[in-house]
Image: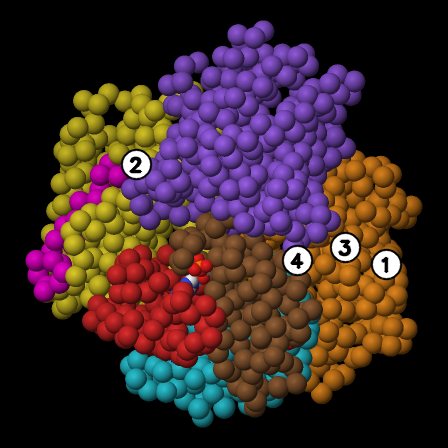
Chain colours: A red, B cyan, C brown, D orange, E yellow, F purple
Amino acid sequence: MERRRKLTIITESAIEGLLTDQLERLGAKGYTIVEARGKGARGVRTGDWDQNMNVQIDIICDESTAHRIVTYCSEHYYKNYAMILYLSDVDVIRPEKF
Amino acid sequence: MERRRKLTIITESAIEGLLTDQLERLGAKGYTIVEARGKGARGVRTGDWDQNMNVQIDIICDESTAHRIVTYCSEHYYKNYAMILYLSDVDVIRPEKF
Amino acid sequence: MERRRKLTIITESAIEGLLTDQLERLGAKGYTIVEARGKGARGVRTGDWDQNMNVQIDIICDESTAHRIVTYCSEHYYKNYAMILYLSDVDVIRPEKF
Amino acid sequence: MTMIDNLLDPTILFFIVGIVAGIVRSELRLPEAIYEILSIYLLLAIGIKGGLQLSTSKWSAIVLPCLGAVSVGLVIPVIAYPILRRLGKLSRPDAAAIAAHYGSVSAVTYAVVLSFLDKLNVPYEEYTTVLLVLLEIPAIAVGILIARLRTAQGTISYRRLAHEVFFGKSIYLLIAGLVVGVVGGPEGIAPVKLVFIDPFKGALAFFLLEMGLVASHRLSDLKRTGVFLVLFGIGMPILSAAIGTVVGWGVGLSIGGTTILATLAGSASYIAAPAAMRIAVPEANPTLYLTAALGVTFPFNLVFGIPLYYHMATLIH
Amino acid sequence: MTMIDNLLDPTILFFIVGIVAGIVRSELRLPEAIYEILSIYLLLAIGIKGGLQLSTSKWSAIVLPCLGAVSVGLVIPVIAYPILRRLGKLSRPDAAAIAAHYGSVSAVTYAVVLSFLDKLNVPYEEYTTVLLVLLEIPAIAVGILIARLRTAQGTISYRRLAHEVFFGKSIYLLIAGLVVGVVGGPEGIAPVKLVFIDPFKGALAFFLLEMGLVASHRLSDLKRTGVFLVLFGIGMPILSAAIGTVVGWGVGLSIGGTTILATLAGSASYIAAPAAMRIAVPEANPTLYLTAALGVTFPFNLVFGIPLYYHMATLIH
Amino acid sequence: MTMIDNLLDPTILFFIVGIVAGIVRSELRLPEAIYEILSIYLLLAIGIKGGLQLSTSKWSAIVLPCLGAVSVGLVIPVIAYPILRRLGKLSRPDAAAIAAHYGSVSAVTYAVVLSFLDKLNVPYEEYTTVLLVLLEIPAIAVGILIARLRTAQGTISYRRLAHEVFFGKSIYLLIAGLVVGVVGGPEGIAPVKLVFIDPFKGALAFFLLEMGLVASHRLSDLKRTGVFLVLFGIGMPILSAAIGTVVGWGVGLSIGGTTILATLAGSASYIAAPAAMRIAVPEANPTLYLTAALGVTFPFNLVFGIPLYYHMATLIH
Ligand SMILES: Nc1ncnc2c1ncn2[C@@H]1O[C@H](COP(=O)(O)O)[C@@H](O)[C@H]1O
Ligand SMILES: Nc1ncnc2c1ncn2[C@@H]1O[C@H](COP(=O)(O)O)[C@@H](O)[C@H]1O
Ligand SMILES: Nc1ncnc2c1ncn2[C@@H]1O[C@H](COP(=O)(O)O)[C@@H](O)[C@H]1O
Ligand code: NA
Ligand code: NA
Ligand code: NA
C-alpha cells in the first residue's frame, strides 16, 4: 500500500474528449469518469441535455503527474469553462499501476 | 493550493430539491451531484425507480460551512431519511472559489 | 465525528453482483455504487454496453474490514478483472453506522 | 370473463414476467431512464385520451360524477386512518401516509381496467380520466392534513407541499395531457396518434414488466411488515371499491363507469402519493406504504380486484 | 392558418407544456438518455425522409437551390456579426459565436415548418432536407473563421475543428440518414417505415416537450443577458428569413419551398452550433448564444415566425 | 438476392452507419440505457413471435428439429476447442470461452436471417425461435464444462453458474416471450402487437446502429489479437453453418428452415455468452472472444454469411 494523489476534475462534458486525449500524454496511466450535474460560479448545470452536463474525472497518479495536469488545465480551460479541480490523498493497492 | 473540506452526503433522491435549496443559504458556493444506489441501515436502494434512488452530493467548502450543513442535515433529515454524511480533506486549486 | 476508511473499488459491472454478495459477509455495513467508465491497464471501458461498463463502489468501514475486503478482492479478482482499489480517510458523522 | 382469463391477458402476463424475474433473482433490470420515460408517457397518454373524450362530452353530464369522485377521495382516507391506527396499531404518520395512498389512485390500474372493459366490450363514460385526476389530489391533501393535525410535524410549509402535489410529475402530466387533448381535439391529435394513442397498451405492458420487478422486491418486505398489512392491502381496496360502486351507481354512471370508479377507489397510488408523502410526512416509513400499495394491492387489483369490481357493478345495476 | 391556430397545434402545445413545467418549477424532468435518443432519432429520420425524396428527384433541379442555401448560410453570419458587435456591444468571440448560431439551422424548427405546410396542404420541393444539411455547415465554419481572425485564439487545430463539425452527432446523422434513404429507396425503407417515418410527429412532440423544459431554464437568464439579445433574437430571424425568402424565390422554389428556406434561414441552431462553438470559440459565453437561440428565437419561430415566413413567401410569389 | 443487395438492405446500412461512425470517431454515442432497452425489447419480441408460432404448431413436428438443434449446439464447441488450442495456440480458458461463443447463437443475426428470407419470400418453419432458445444454452454449458475440466478453476459454484445461464437476461427474456406468446396467442397479443411485433425491424435497425458502434471499437483490437482470430472468425461460422445445413436437411427442415439453422449454427453469441463466460471462465480474455464474435463473425454473417448459408441450403435440397 502506497500513497498517491487523486486528482478530481469536474467540468463540462463538452470537453471530455479534448481532456482525456491529453491525460495520457501528461503521464496519467488511467482515469475514471462519472456523469454529474451541479452548481458553481457558472450557474446551475442540470445535466438534462448536451450543453448542460458535467463529468467528474478522477485520476490516481503521483504528485508530479497531478501537477502537470493541473497546470495544463489551468492554462487551457480555467478561464473559459466551468471547471473545478482538487486533490486528495489515497493509499493505493498495487502501486505499480499508478 | 489550499486545504478545504469535502462534505459528502448520500441520501434519497426524493429530498434532493429540498436539500440543494438549503445549501446555498448555508454558505456553500457550489455542489456536485451524482446518481447512486447502495445499501445501508435502511436496506437496499437499487435505484430502479423514483422511490428507490440515491444521490451523492459533494460540497467543497470551509470547515465552518461544512459544520453548518452537517448540523442542518442532522436536525432535519437524519431521523427520517436514508442518509449518510462524511467529510474528507482536499487541496483545492483556485481556493477563492470555495 | 470519528475517523473511518473509505475503500473505493472500481471494476467491471459484470461482477457487481458477486462482489456485493460478499461485502456484507466481510463486515461492511453498507456501500454506495455509481456507474462509471474509464481507462486503465485493461484498456478503455466506454460504458456503452453490458461488457464494457465499470462500477465504482465506495465502502465506509473500519480499517480491519477494509483490509479483509482488499484481501478478498486481491485473491479473487485482481488477476482476471479490470479492477483498481484505493483507500482514503474520512471523518464520519454518526460513527455507529459504519 | 373469469379471473383466469384476466390472468392470461398479455398485459398481466408481463407483470408476472417481471415478478418472476425478481423472485428468481434474474439479472434482468430496466434502466431507470426507461422507468421514467414510460411513466411520463403513460400519464401524458392517459391525460390526452381523457382530453379527447372531454372535448366531445357535455360538461353538464360530468358535474355529478366529478363531485362523486371527489367525495370518494375525501372519504376513503378518513375511513382508512382509524382502521390503520386501531386494528393495525400503526403510528400516526404511518397511518396517515398509508391512508393517503389508498385514497389516491393508481393510473396504471386505471389503464388496466379500461383495457379489461374494452375486451369485454363494456361501454363506459368518456370522461373517466377526469375522475382519475380528481381522485389523485384530495386524498393526498387529506392524508397530509391528518398527519399534520395528529403529529407535531411541520418543517415544510404548506405552500411547498401544495406545489409538490399540484406540480409533481404525476398530476402535472395528467392535467397537461387533458389540456392537450381538449385543445387539440381528435383532428389536432391525429398526427401524433401513432405515438400517444395507438401503442398505449404495448407501453403499458412494458411498464407492467417493470412494475413486476419493483413489486417483487417489495414481496420480500412482506415478512417484516406483518400480516396486518397484507389483510389491509386486500380488504381496504374491496371496501373502497364497494364505496366507489355505490357512489358510481348513485351519480348515475353506467356499469362500465361504475366499475371504473370502483377500481379507482380500490386502487392505491404509487407514483403521486409516495413522492408527496416522503416529503410531507417524513416520519412515515416508506417500506410500509410501498409494500402495501405495490406488493399487495396492486397485484391483487390486477388479477382479482378488477373482475370482482366489475361483478359488483353488475350486481348493483 | 392564423397564429392562434398554429399555437393550438399539438406539437406546439407540447412545447408549451414543457415551458410551463419549467416556469412553475414542476418536478417533471426527462432523463438525459431520452433527450439523447430523441435527438438521434429525429436527425436520422429527417435525413432518411430527405434521402427518400432525393432518390426520386432530378439532380439537375437541385443544384441552384443548393447554391442558394449555401450562400444564405455564408451571408447571414457576416451580416449578424457587425450587428452584434456594434449595436449589441458584444465581445468578438460572443458576436462570432452568436453569428454562427443564426447562420446555422434548427432541425426541429425545420420539422415544424414541414408539418405546418402539410397541415395547410401547401406542396414543397422534395429535397429540402438537402438544403437543411447544406445550411448547417457553412455558417458554423464562417463563425469559427470570424472568431479566429478577430481574436488571438487558437489552442485547437483546424483539423480537430473540421472533425468536430463534420463528424459531430448532428451533421453525421443527417448525412447518414440521407445515404440510408437514397440507397434504400422507398421499397428498402418500407420495413422500417413504422419506426423511422410514421411516428416522426409524435417523437417531435415529445422532443418539443423536452425543449420546452430546456428553454424555460433559459428564460430566467433573459434578465441577465439584457434587452438587446431579445430584440436580436426576434429581429435577426425576420431579417434572415427575408433574405431566405428572396433567395428562395430567386432560385425558383415554390411557395412551400420558399417558406422552408426562409424558416431555415430564420432559425438558429441549438444542436450542432453550440457543440462546435463551445470547443471552437471557448471565450464565447454559452449563456448568451443559448439564451438567444433557445430562449427567444426558437419559441418565436414556432409560434409567430413560421406563419409569418409563409406569409412572406406568399407575398413574393 | 446477391450479396450486394444484402449489403444495401437498410438494416445492414444502419450497421454500416454505426461502424463508420466508430471508425471516423464521430461524437455519436447511444446512451447505455438505450442499448439496454433495445436488447430487452428485441429478445422479448423474438420470444413472443416464436410463442405465437408455437401456439399454432404441432408439437410432434418440432421434436426432431429440436434434437437436431441441441446436438449442433453440443457439437460445435467440441469441434472449435481443439482448433483454437492447436491451430490458434490459445490458452485453455481462452479456447473454451471462444468455443462457447461459437456454439451459442446471436439473436440479432437470427432476426436478420428472418428478414432476409422474408424479403426473398422463402417460407420457413414457424417454430424456429424455439431452436434459437435451445441453441443458446447447451453450448454455453459445454464451454463452461470444458473450461472447468481443463483448468484448475472453480471459485464459483455450479449452482451459481446455472443460475447465471438460465436466469441471465438473454435466456430469461426469450423464454418469457415464448410463454407470453403461447399463452396469449394471436388474439391475446393483438392489442400489444403495435409495440411488440410491428416495429421489430425498425428497432432492429436501431440496435444494429449501436452494434456497429460497438463492433467498430473491436476492430482496433484486431491488430493485437492477430490474424488467426480473423481466419477463425470467418472459417468457423462457415464450418458450423455447414454442419447446421446438413443437420437441418437431415431433420427434414425446409430450405428456409435449413438456412435458419445454418445461420444459428454459424452465428456467435454476444449477449448471453459474454455475460456467462466473464463469470464462469474469468481467466479468458474478453478481448479475444468479443473481437472474434463481434468484430469479425457478426459483420461477416450479416453481409456475406447469410446469403452464403441460403445458397448452401438450396444446394443440399
Ligand atoms: N463548492 C463546490 N463543491 C462541489 N462542487 C462544485 C463546487 N463548485 C463547483 N462545483 C462543480 O464544478 C462545476 C463547475 O464549477 P464552476 O466552474 O464554478 O461553475 C459545477 O457545475 C459543479 O458541478
Ligand atoms: N458503510 C457505508 N459505506 C458506503 N455507503 C453507505 C454505507 N452505509 C450507507 N451507505 C449509503 O448511504 C445510503 C443511506 O444509508 P442508510 O441511511 O444507512 O440506509 C445507502 O443507501 C448507501 O448508498
Ligand atoms: N490511474 C487511474 N486513475 C483513475 N482510475 C483508474 C486508473 N487506472 C484504472 N482506473 C479505473 O479502473 C478501471 C480498471 O482498471 P484496469 O484494471 O487498470 O484496467 C479502469 O477502467 C478505470 O475506470
Ligand atoms: Na384509491
Ligand atoms: Na439560420
Ligand atoms: Na453458433
Residue where numbered disc 2 is placed: E175
Q: From the viewer's perspective, is A25 left or right of A96?
A: left
| Whether marks 4 and 1 lie on the same chain | yes
Dot label at residue D234: 1
Single out the mark in the foreground, 2 or 1. 2
Could you tell me if residue E228 is visible in this image? no
Residue F14's x, y, as percent? 41, 33
The amino acid at mark 4 is: Val
Q: Are marks 3 and 4 in contact (CB under 8 Å)?
A: no
Q: Are marks 3 and 1 in contact (CB under 8 Å)?
A: no
Residue where numbered disc 3 is placed: D298
Residue F109's x, y, as percent? 52, 29
**Residue drawn where x is 63% and y is 34% of the image:** F139
Foreground residue, F271 or E267?
A: F271
Q: CA distance from mark 2 to mark 1?
A: 57 Å
Quadrant of the snapshot with the N terminus of chain F: top left
The amino acid at mark 1 is: Ile
Single out the mark in the foreground, 3 or 2. 2
Q: Residue furthest bottom?
A: B64
**Residue drawn where x is 32% and y is 40% of the image:** F23
Q: Is residue E43 above or below residue D75?
A: above
Q: Which chain letter matches label 1?
A: D
Single out the mark in the foreground, 4 or 1. 1
CB of residue at label 2: within 8 Å of ligand 5?
A: no
Residue where numbered disc 4 is placed: D133
The amino acid at mark 3 is: Phe
Tell me which segment is drawn in magenta. Answer: E131-154
The amino acid at mark 2 is: Ile
Q: CA distance from mark 2 to mark 4?
A: 45 Å
Quarter-wise, where is residue F106 in the image? top right
